[in-house]
Image (cartoon, helix red, strand yellow):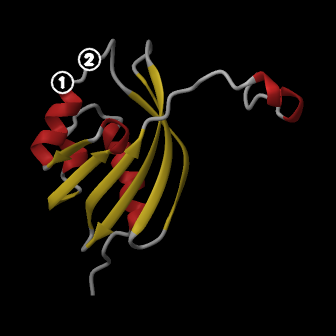
Amino acid sequence: MQHSATALELARQFWELMATNDFTRPARLFSEGFVLDWPQTNERIRGRENFSRLNAEYPAHGPWRFELEALVGDAHTAVSRVRVTDGVQSALAISFFEVSGGCIDQITEFWPDTYTPPSNRAHLTEPLKA
């Protein structure tokens, strides 16, 4: 019996392949019906080719770097927190992976923007980073 990759394993492999900046490589992990959802902008990217082209055509100042900060999951679902930068622009991605049959079926991804916290709670909080 052959081992089918878990969501946790596939999510880790996905980010490793994204770091190559050859965006056809991570797309090989996708099922035939793969979709990537970006709820914040109400966009769905359907299929390997659209995923690869979208990433290759995205404006960048240099190669993309991905720092995997957290990854949790099991056989069928995984969640990652990744810092993404091209050396000029940087962002945080929270990605939810759904897997079946050893392939990634869906990724739902959130790209939260940072903002200055309200001053009325400053007495109860501290910065995450100095």
Q: Could you tell me residue 75's position as x and y percent?
A: 41, 73
Q: Residue at x 32, y 39 (%)?
A: 18
Quarter that holds the C terminus: top right
Q: Which mark is residue 59?
A: 2
Query: Which quarter of the figure is the N terminus placed in?
Result: bottom left
Q: Amino acid at mark 2?
A: Pro
Q: Residue at x 14, y 33 (%)?
A: 53
In the structure shown, which secondary structural element does the residue marked by tag 1 occupy?
helix
48 shown above or below 58: below
Q: Residue 6 at what x, y percent from top left?
A: 38, 69
Instruction: Give the crowd class for mark 1: few <14, some 14-19, many >=20 residues within 10 Å.
Output: few
Indicate the position of residue 59 as horizontal and vertical percent values: 26, 17
In front of the other: 120 or 104:
120
Residue under label 1, please give it: 57
Asked if labels 1 and 2 touch by Cβ distance under 8 angstroms, the answer is no
Name, please, the residue furthest toward the right.
Answer: 123
